Image (cartoon, grey):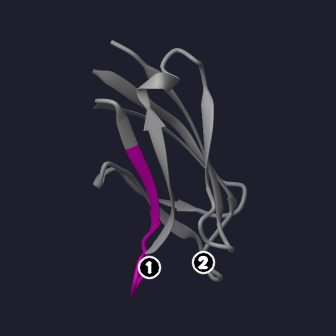
């Protein structure tokens, strides 16, 4: 079993034109953190741990009043264990850019 440690999430560019984004972090389809109200330059410390086998998909979603926006998905693999702090980039939408720091620990 491998463990994903999500450290921080930073908003470089927000999705919503008005107000702050309400960002939810999901791992393999399950919400693990949020919603977090983030605007440009804001960051939040998550310190979230999730175990996985082989790989895990991390998705950021901006919750909206109507249809939610998927900000991006990254795949974390067990081969990243022991490398140190890594950064994932979520910029699937032209208007949004989020950076997540994380590390991976093997068992």
Q: Residues within 10 Å of mark 1 (few under 14, many from 20)?
A: few
- Mark 1 touches mark 2? (CB < 8 Å): yes
* Residue 105 position within the rendered picture, expressed as x and y whole percent measured from the top left: 43, 18
In the rendered structure, which segment of residues is drawn in magenta? 57-68
Q: Residue at x 60, y 78 (%)?
A: 16
In the image, is 77 to the left or to the right of 39? left
In the picture of the structure, the residue carrying the numbered disc 2 is: 16
Pick the front one: 77 or 63: 77
Pick the front one: 57 or 97: 57
* Residue 106 position within the rendered picture, expressed as x and y whole percent measured from the top left: 39, 15
Describe the element under mark 2 as helix, strand or loop: loop
Q: Name above or below for residue 56 compared with residue 64.
A: above
Q: Quadrant of residue 97?
A: bottom right
Describe the element under mark 1 as helix, strand or loop: loop
* Residue 45 position within the rendered picture, expressed as x and y whole percent measured from the top left: 53, 39
Residue, far bottom: 66
Q: Which mark is residue 80?
A: none
Can residue 62 be found in the magenta stretch?
yes
Can residue 56 be found in the magenta stretch?
no
In the image, is 17 to the left or to the right of 53? right
Q: Quadrant of residue 54?
A: top left
In the picture, the quarter occupied by the N terminus is top left
In the image, is 12 to the left or to the right of 55? right
In the picture of the structure, the residue carrying the numbered disc 1 is: 64
Q: Residue at x 46, y 44 (%)?
A: 75
Pick the front one: 12 or 42: 12
* Residue 103 position within the rendered picture, expressed as x and y whole percent measured from the top left: 52, 26
Q: Residue at x 39, y 47 (%)?
A: 57
In the picture, the quarter occupied by the C terminus is top left
In the image, is 74 to the left or to the right of 10? left
């Amino acid at each position: 079993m491998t463990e994903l440690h999500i450290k921080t999430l930073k908003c470089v560019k927000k999705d919503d034109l008005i107000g702050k984004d309400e960002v939810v972090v999901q791992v393999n389809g399950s919400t693990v953190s949020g919603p977090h109200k983030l605007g440009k330059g804001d960051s939040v410390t998550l310190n979230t741990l999730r175990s996985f086998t082989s790989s895990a998909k991390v998705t950021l979603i901006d919750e909206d009043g109507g249809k939610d926006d998927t900000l991006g998905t990254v795949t974390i693999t067990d081969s990243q264990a022991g490398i140190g702090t890594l950064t994932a980039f979520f910029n699937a939408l032209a208007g949004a850019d989020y950076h997540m720091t994380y590390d991976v620990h093997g068992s």
